[in-house]
Image: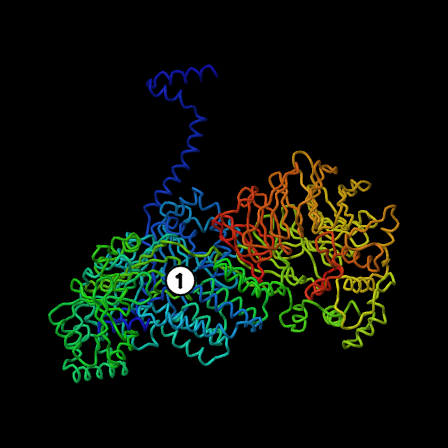
Amino acid sequence: MDELENKEKYDLEEELPNSVQHAKRKVPLFFRILLSVFFVPVFIIAAWFAFSFFNRTNDLNLYPKSFDVFVHAESVYDSLNPLLDLKSCDILFAEKQFSQFRKAFMDIKSSDLRNNGAVKFVLRRKVNFALYGSEDNPSQFDYMATLDLSYLSALSRLYRIVFPFLGVKEMSLVEESSSVRSYLKFSDGVNDIFIKPHKNVVLVTNSKTLLEKAFSSVNENEYSREDESTLTDSSRGDIHICVNSRNFIKKNTEKDEFLRNLHTLIPAEKYTSLDFSINDSEINLKADVPVDVAGSSFEAKKVLEKYSEVPVIVQKLPSKTQYYTVLDFGPFWELRDNAFPLLEKDKKMLDSWKKADSLCKTFFSLSLDDLVFSWTKNECAVFGIEGSSDPVFALQISDEKKRAEVFDILESSILINNNTSLILNGTRLPCLELPSFLTGLLSCFGVNLPSAYYFINDSFIYFSISPQNLSVLNSEIKDKKFLVNNESWKSASKKGHSKSSVNMYYDLERSVPFFINSKTIAGKILNLYNIGNMTLNVDKGCLKISLHAVVIENKNTKIIPGFPISLEGKTDYALSISSDRKTVFWIENSVKVCSLELDSLEKHELEISDGCSMCVSDEKGEYCLWVLSKSGTAYLLNGKLECRKNFPVITNMQPSCDCAVSRGTAYFATNDGKIISVGKNGEFKDLCTIDDVKIKSRPSVCGDTVYFYSRGFEGLVYAFKNGEFMNLENPMIIDGIGFGSPCCVSHDSKTYTAFMTQSGLFFLYADNEIVENFPLQLDDTFHTNAVFKDGAFFVLSDSAVVYKIMTDGAFFGVKIPDSSTAVSGFISVKNDSTYGGIYVCADKNILYGFDSSLELLGSFPVAGFGEPQFADVNGDRKIDCLTLSIDRKLNAWSLK
Amino acid sequence: MKRFFYFLMLFFSFAFFSCMTLQKDLAIDVDETEYQGSMLELELRIAHLDVLAITGNTESGFAVEKNAILKTIDESLASPVIDKSVEARFLALRGRTFLIYGDRVSAKKMLREAEKKSMNDTQVLILKRRVGELSIVSEVSENPSLKSGLLFLESAVEHYEKNDYAESAGMFDVAFTLLDPAYKAEYGIIRDKAWLLKDSDSSDVDTLSFMEKTSVTVSDMLCITQKAKGNVLVSVTGGKKLKAKPLFRMMSEKKLLESVSGHDDGKISADTAVTKKLCARFLWNVYSLNHAELDRNMYSKKYASRANPKSPIRDLDISDADFDAVVGTVENEIMELSDGVNFSPDKNVSGKEFYDSLMSGEL
């Protein structure tokens, strides 16, 4: 039977063409099944991704039109990632109203995910964001954001299937019969966030109403192509913002009659676009405000019917100009006519004008119009000269002959005194002393010009109280030294509009533009950029505003935004830091343990009524702070000052010294010579007792050995290890009384113990034996003890000298700059490659840093007293310095 | 915004002058002018008078200097070409001079004139604070454009006047790093006092005045002990608050002013100036009161029993009546040696030294 079957099979195979037979031999059935199993899912996935790519919607059409602000960025990552490192963001999140977001910001800022390729890939997507103002409360906004995932939406489209496996407690899947149908709802009990993946888009909003509006058919295709290109144009900056100006002004200016009229200038159907880019060296803002002059009831609307021109005066300003404002809104007489409707609203101003006009006619036989407008052209300017506080005013002359006539009349008048001409640097500078009614009128405009020198050059007349200004101006013009050739001006002005009606150049050293108010967050941010140029360009139907500011010379202090933090009580200037460098600890008024979480700037307090000392554990872990009360109760706390399980531990042993921690166990001595240990599990042990000792200072720790210094004229240092004293019979002798604790270190396979007495006798023991050439007598007195770094010991004397003592007995000293005493000074050491150094304070609120060669560290001194700590406070991945200071503050300094 | 738009429109109506409203010009720093040198000299002369006035040391040459300074200022103000910031500073310094000599009316008049020239000049702000029109200079110093060494110095003086010594000392130190060293030479005396008192309670005027004393009497010592650390005397006073005389009487009766060896070296009255040795004696007796198990003569016994008895303190013999008290207080970190080897037993104790010893955690 088998033979027959085999024969039939063989016959069949013979009949097949050769190629088929060959193929059949090459791909066995097993592989065919395997390939099918592999390729079919791949094909399905590829098809799903392709479908996701082509099945898209325009996310713009999800936005209801009533938004106040619309933000567009071509790439979330490229737009937002650079912003995280800005000083401006540090300022923003140090403000009280944004402090709740500081921790999240710091986490993101210092996160490694920022450089993760996958994260970059996912976040390089288009994002839109809109704010919708509440009708009832203009200060409240709802938001809606959409992220275009493109083909990656293949994943987001599966949210209904995937959601049950996510296991996010706060999130729920909501199914409804409304147009939205299904969405995810995230709720933390206070706020709700709605997330709706839809085709290629993921929509996020805090408003259910907005979510419903987004998917209602009314909204669809509401945006024209023009609108779309306006809203999503990102050619001029990293982030493109559109504002529904008419809505915005209307909502925010209801209480002000004057400003309320402004909204009629803005066409309802057009958006103001705002583009900005920012980095630590420059900030650039551009805004285009469409205006509809025809339909407006605004009084001075004619001004906006003009086209701006390139201001001539800017080319003529001397190179010593530190700031200027140039205005060009057409001929002055025209401006007067346009502005009169406004003047009429201010009675005081109008009265002054009329009074001045009438007096001009009486005394000069000239109207105010003739006096001012008959010879003037379009431009006027005010600018400041280096080294002078008095500004210079400039006015463009249209008719020099007429000007000369007017000035002749004025100068021949008994009311105007021109006898005080001055010759300065070879230039004759005539002086006009204006009559009181004219100076009174000027004072209405905030101008104080009782007697002005003037100077005429190249169709401009310049006025100033200071003749020196005009002399400088003259000589700079002669030498052809102009502002436009200055590098500072070029860098600040390169992105402004060349044609402008308002052109403002500022240097914060000398002038503060109206838009910088140092009390507001925006003002504080703009204050970082000290030189800037603002232009306003009137281009019929559109106001174009540009602001470009740069940092030319950053004189900003090194203090980190959010600091200094004022403390409520006195400290002992001992600042400690957790091993993860995220929390600092200190004690106020001896009874209050305080901690500050550096990422959120959240402060915690724990009161220990009988007084306490603290010590940070030498082991890593959440519970890292040991606190020992004066009655002998031990606490093991975390950064929030919460006690670990089994703590506090009441030992009933009154400590004679602060505690020290070795390998996670705390040790302290009692008045009667007992050595007590408290383990991190809460167990405490009375280890042993030594008679006739006075252990007053914190034990020193070197690895697993704890060193106790018994204070006295015959001081002794005991080494304690594994529950017993190693040198009880042969302690290290310190002949003379001293302060602080011995310095115990392992170096070159030896364990060194160093101690400085008050009288300047320096003892050095190696493995419990006195080192040759020691004790060493220094000609100074000491209130602090030794620290060790890079193979040498360092001590701070009462006369503010830092000594470096080598193990062979060689030594030298360096005086702390500008200090004479350091009786209550501090010396501490940090052994780290980035912030390692010897940090000292003399008897003043200034902290100096030295390297191990006793060269001053570049970023020091900074204000502070006591031991500094180092951590990345602002998330810029650079180490900053934290200090407590005499004036009861916690300071944070960025080290440059 | 309203102001801006108003002014924006007002430009149009009246020539160029309104340009000013778009930018508020700041007066240049006087230190950037040619007056820098002479101004510093003048300011230091006034600083010297200021320190004399603050410390109450208004004797030699104080009155004579007024006219000399005013004359210098008036000559400078008469100069035909003078920048308004310089003028403002001269006027403010004129005002400060009047104020130092108690002429508040003239000082205010000068302030008004100076403000017209420059509102934000440092000396104008200082004068404004001194006449009581600017309460917190530290608030002013928060404005980045107003930060200067002189304002930090003025902040320090303001804190000092409010007895906020810690803040004052901190501010002085920051100011000195920014200012000409001559300021440190003038104000150093005030800064040192602030440093000395930095850990004291600013609201406790009696204690502050005690701490400022360069020498204290026995009565002062007993009163401050009862006031600041009454708990250490409870076993003697029973917690009752006694006046100076009864307190002295009681302490004498309880032998707290006698040496533990029992050898007295002279009669002690309430007005006797406290030497370091007497201070050690009293503190050792108080320490012993609260450490009943303590052998008060332990140190003399210990050292005397040696084959070659030698005092660990160079200027105090083992046979001294107060040897135990001195060694005991030094070893227990209640008192200190002067230089690590000498105690200076006959040196008078200052208020601050006694207070620090009294408040040491060991007592």
Q: Position of residue A862 (x, y in %)?
A: 52, 54
In the rendered image, which quarter is residue A226 located in?
bottom left
Q: Residue at x 84, y 60 (%)?
A: B321
**Residue receiving disc 1:** B36
The chain under label 1 reads B
Q: Is residue A616 left or right of residue A366?
A: right
Q: Is residue A283 left or right of residue A855?
A: left
Residue A1 visible here: no
Q: Is residue A116 above or below residue A532?
A: above
Q: Nearer the viewer, residue B291 or A588?
A: B291
Q: Nearer the viewer, residue A66 or B174?
A: B174
Q: Is residue A28 above or below residue B77?
A: above
Q: Nearer the viewer, residue B283 or B59?
A: B59
Q: Position of residue A873 (x, y in %)?
A: 51, 53
* Tag 1 secondary structure: helix
Q: Is residue A783 left or right of residue B304?
A: left
The kind of residue on which mark 1 rests is Gln
Q: Position of residue A848 (x, y in %)?
A: 55, 51
Residue B307 visible here: yes
Q: Is residue A801 left or right of residue B90?
A: right
In the rendered image, which quarter is residue A884 located in?
bottom right
Q: Nearer the viewer, residue A457 or B229?
A: A457
Q: Position of residue B10 (x, y in %)?
A: 25, 74
Colour pattern:
rainbow
Residue that extends furthest to the left in the rendered view of this protein: A401
The number of numbered discs placed on residues in the rendered structure image is: 1
Label 1 neighbourhood size at 10 Å, few (<14), some (14-19), many (20+)?
A: some
